[in-house]
């Protein structure tokens, strides 16, 4: 009897040790975006993209280094504020995350990138477009969208060549994103032979633009460019209408959202507003992009704002590097992530260059008709 008992106990111990050996590998992925404040709708959109990817990865049963990976999302709110952004970054580092997706704004992404770099933690931004992000020499920084040089420059040329802008005014919100994209827009205008008749500044929390718009109205612009986010662009469009400024309104990805018509409170005319999203899908990729958007709406009961698909791809690219490296240890999978080439995502093919920027990044040009975004073309 004692012998049988010993055999049973031994078998249970062996079984338990085997179970321990095959325990799930917990992989923590951090996500940071502004889930409070004026652009919370964009931050929540990004976070849902991350949640969707994490949910799918856990359902799939990903194996990393012979162990089944269990993915956990650690989501932080930076409210679009640089100080809160670095605090959120440090919190994720202290939580020993294996990688970070974010931040949304260039103004939070750039200072946070030093925190991640110092800790050796890979960071992929799905939406920060300021060129400085990948030009600080950090080996840990990557992005899956085109930068402001491409974005602003293309919009500048478009305003001159396609919108036939003769006198172009520029306004920016003085953030790293807003000022950066406005600077590149101005270069694009001048490079295309266009004329800048005025440059004005506001901030990312302003609601009254009467003074700067009145100043610009005297210069009779036919195109007004705004470097900033939709929460500021909406009220600005309302006040342009009140002041009788009938210029075309152009902006980057920050204004290129489904919320803009609501924020402008019905003051946008058809084909008055033009914007570009720092990304774009065409051909075969459009099928997977459309399928993603349909599944996203079914799952979360809301439409994609802008960058949820890019967040989704960023998570999947990071995990693909872990799988290939056979490790979720940042030091081990980081070199593999840096060599990412030809990854087929819902936003298109992802290949990183030696700075961590996406190669051959696309832009999607949009206008608005009937209070909804309408795609014009994908530009590379």
Image (cartoon, rainbow, N blue to C red):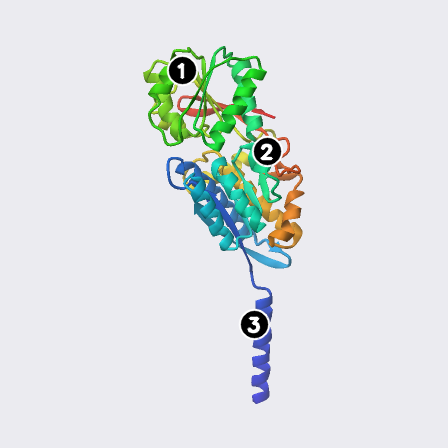
Confirm whether residue 105 shows in the render: no
The front one of 80 and 199 is 199
Q: Residue furthest bottom?
A: 1
Quick one: label 3 or label 1, which is nearer the N terminus? 3
Quick one: label 2 or label 1, which is nearer the N terminus? 1
Question: For mark 2, does the 10 Å Cα neighbourhood hold few (<14), some (14 to 19), or many (20 or more) residues?
Answer: some
Q: Which residue carries the number 2 mark?
A: 285
Look at 57% across and 54% down and name the residue there. Answer: 61
The front one of 165 and 200 is 200
Q: Considering only vertical position in the picture, is 155 above or below 38?
A: above
Look at 52% across and 22% down and name the residue there. Answer: 185
Image quarter where the N terminus lies is bottom right
Secondary-structure class at tag 2 = helix
Q: Which residue carries the number 3 mark?
A: 16
- Image depth: mark 3 or mark 1 in front: 1
Q: Position of residue 3 (x, y in %)?
A: 59, 87
Q: Position of residue 194 (x, y in %)?
A: 54, 13
Q: Which residue carries the number 1 mark?
A: 216
Q: CA distance from mark 2 to mark 1?
A: 42 Å
Look at 46% across and 32% down and name the residue there. Answer: 175
Q: Considering only vertical position in the picture, is 203 above or below 81?
A: above
Do the numbered discs 2 and 1 sit on residues whose CB atoms are within 8 Å?
no
Q: Position of residue 25 (x, y in %)?
A: 57, 59
Question: For mark 3, does the 10 Å Cα neighbourhood hold few (<14), some (14 to 19), or many (20 or more) residues?
Answer: few
Q: CA distance from mark 3 to mark 2?
A: 46 Å
Quick one: label 3 or label 2, which is nearer the N terminus? 3
User: Quarter of the image holding residue 140?
Assistant: top right
The front one of 308 and 100 is 100
Secondary-structure class at tag 3 = helix
Image quarter where the C terminus lies is top right
Q: Position of residue 313 (x, y in %)?
A: 56, 41
């Amino acid at each position: 009897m004692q012998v049988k008992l010993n055999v049973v106990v031994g078998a249970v111990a062996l079984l338990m040790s085997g179970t321990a050996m095959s325990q799930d590998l917990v992989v923590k992925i951090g996500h940071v975006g502004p889930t409070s404040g004026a652009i919370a709708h964009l931050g929540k959109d990004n976070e849902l993209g991350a949640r969707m990817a994490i949910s799918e990865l856990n359902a799939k049963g990903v194996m990393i280094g012979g162990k089944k990976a269990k993915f956990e999302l650690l989501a932080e709110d930076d409210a679009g504020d640089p100080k809160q952004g670095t605090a959120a970054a440090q919190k994720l580092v202290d939580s020993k995350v294996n990688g970070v997706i974010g931040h949304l704004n260039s103004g939070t992404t750039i200072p946070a990138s030093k925190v991640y770099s110092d800790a050796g933690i890979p960071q992929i931004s799905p939406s920060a477009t300021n060129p400085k992000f990948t030009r600080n020499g950090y080996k840990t920084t990557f992005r899956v969208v085109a930068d402001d040089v491409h974005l602003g420059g293309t919009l500048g040329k478009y305003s001159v060549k396609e919108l036939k802008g003769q006198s172009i005014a520029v306004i920016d919100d003085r953030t790293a994103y807003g000022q950066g994209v406005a600077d590149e827009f101005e270069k694009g205008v001048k490079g295309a032979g266009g004329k800048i008749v005025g440059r004005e500044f506001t901030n990312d929390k302003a609601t009254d633009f009467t003074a700067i718009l009145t100043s610009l109205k005297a210069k009779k612009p036919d195109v007004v460019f705004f470097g900033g986010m939709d929460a500021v662009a909406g009220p600005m469009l309302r006040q342009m209408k009140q002041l009788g400024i009938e210029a075309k309104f152009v902006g980057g990805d920050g204004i290129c959202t489904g919320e803009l018509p609501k924020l402008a409170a019905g003051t946008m005319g058809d084909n008055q507003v033009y914007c570009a999203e720092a990304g774009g899908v065409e051909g075969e990729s459009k099928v997977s992009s459309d399928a993603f958007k349909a599944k996203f709406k079914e799952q979360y009961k809301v439409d994609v704002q802008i960058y949820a698909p890019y967040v989704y791809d960023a998570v999947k690219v990071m995990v693909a590097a872990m799988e290939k490296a056979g490790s979720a240890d940042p030091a081990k999978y980081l070199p593999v992530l840096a060599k990412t080439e030809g990854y087929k995502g819902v936003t298109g093919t992802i290949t990183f260059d030696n700075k961590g920027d996406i190669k051959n990044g696309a832009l999607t040009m949009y206008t608005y008709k009937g209070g909804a975004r309408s795609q014009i073309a994908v530009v590379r």
